[in-house]
Image (cartoon, rainbow, N blue to C red):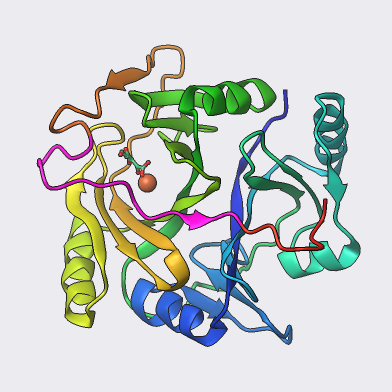
Amino acid sequence: MIELTDIAYVRSGVADLDRAVRFATEVVGLEHVGSDEVGVAHLRADARHHCLAFVEGASGVIASAFTVADEDALALAETELETRGFHVWRGTAEDARTRRVGAVVGFDDPFGNRLELVCAQQSLGRPVVPGRASGITEFGHLCLDAPDVAEAHRFFSTTFNARASDWIGDAACLMRIDEVHHKLAVFRGDHPGLCHVNFQVAELDDVFRNWHHLQDLGVEIEMGPGRHPQSGAVFLYFLGPEGLTYEYSYGVRRITDEAAWRPRFFDPAERGSIDMWLGPTQKPITQPQLLPEGVRP
Ligand SMILES: O=C/C=C/C(C(=O)O)=C(/O)C(=O)O
Ligand SMILES: [Fe+2]
């Protein structure tokens, strides 16, 4: 069993790097962390050096990453994944440098989502300088697609320390790796990809202020504002460039009594199972998994 300690970052390929960065900063409110690297932009939401990296090239998610405790834990994880039959690649020093981590290994999950495990993710001590005052406090969670959500849960809960917090029938499983209700979610989708990235905001007012702001800018609102009965969070999903769905949310539940929590089962066909405020619901748009020619493994 490999212990994931946190989510680390998402790497996403974009054909128009400037547009993607402008949206992430001026619309979403992330910080663009400057560097001398060409063709890569790092976006920051919290103490992590970055939680989103845009890589100039073909559009599509490149990888979603999680942290493990240290270099020893990473080496053990590499061995364990190989024992379980996964083809694991170990990143070079340059791979680790551009990710601002001590070391990185990668592999494809059974559904074709490329995952990376990292140790020693770099923190920045200086305060975040948001591109806009959207109230973001933290990279909250990431959500992947898989054709069989129960299988995905089986994979993540037996290979890793992920636990189901709640189920939405066979449409979604929300999983925790610490006290936060979910840092990883899997939604049912025919193809691998990134369903959305979530950012927590400081106040309920931020969700609504951001909603008005996004509408004024003509940004496509995919769902919300509403309240999820699972985490209890007030949410807003919207579409960024190149098919990347962002979510703001406020008020996510923390599961502090691990022994007492029992996952709940919601029927996606029942009204209110996704939005307690009974607004229109739809699955967020997924950014497909990118597997360019020549990319390992
Ligand atoms: O469709 C249900 C989504 C639930 C939640 C939640 O409870 O907060 C999410 O954030 C999500 O997985 O997107
Ligand atoms: Fe979400």
> Outermost residue, left direction?
278
Indicate whether residue 288 is drawn in magenta: yes
* Quarter location, residue 252: top left
* Quarter location, residue 192: top right
Residue 277 horizontal/vertical position (percent): 10, 42
Residue 101 horizontal/vertical position (percent): 76, 59
User: Principal SS element in the magenta part?
Assistant: loop
Which residue corresponds to the image point at 44% horizontal and 84% vertical from the top-left?
Answer: 22
Which residue corresponds to the image point at 74% horizontal and 49% vertical from the top-left?
Answer: 118
The residue nearer to you, when weighing 48 against 164, is: 164
Residue 130 seen in this snapshot: no
* Quarter location, residue 63: bottom right
The residue nearer to you, when weighing 215 against 104, is: 215
Which residue corresponds to the image point at 30% horizontal and 52% vertical from the top-left?
Answer: 249
- Region of the chain picked out in magenta, as a range: 274-289
The residue nearer to you, when weighing 127 against 21, is: 21
* Quadrant for the N terminus in the image: top right
Indicate whether residue 87 is drawn in magenta: no
Q: Is residue 241 left or right of residue 108?
A: left
Looking at the image, residue 161 lies above or below residue 260: below
Q: Is residue 40 left or right of residue 169?
A: right
Tell me which image quadrant ligand 1 sits in. top left
Residue 38 horizontal/vertical position (percent): 72, 85
Q: Is residue 259 left or right of residue 136?
A: right
Residue 21 horizontal/vertical position (percent): 50, 80
Residue 224 seen in this snapshot: yes
Which residue corresponds to the image point at 68% horizontal and 82% vertical from the top-left?
Answer: 39
How many numbered circles does the render carry? 0
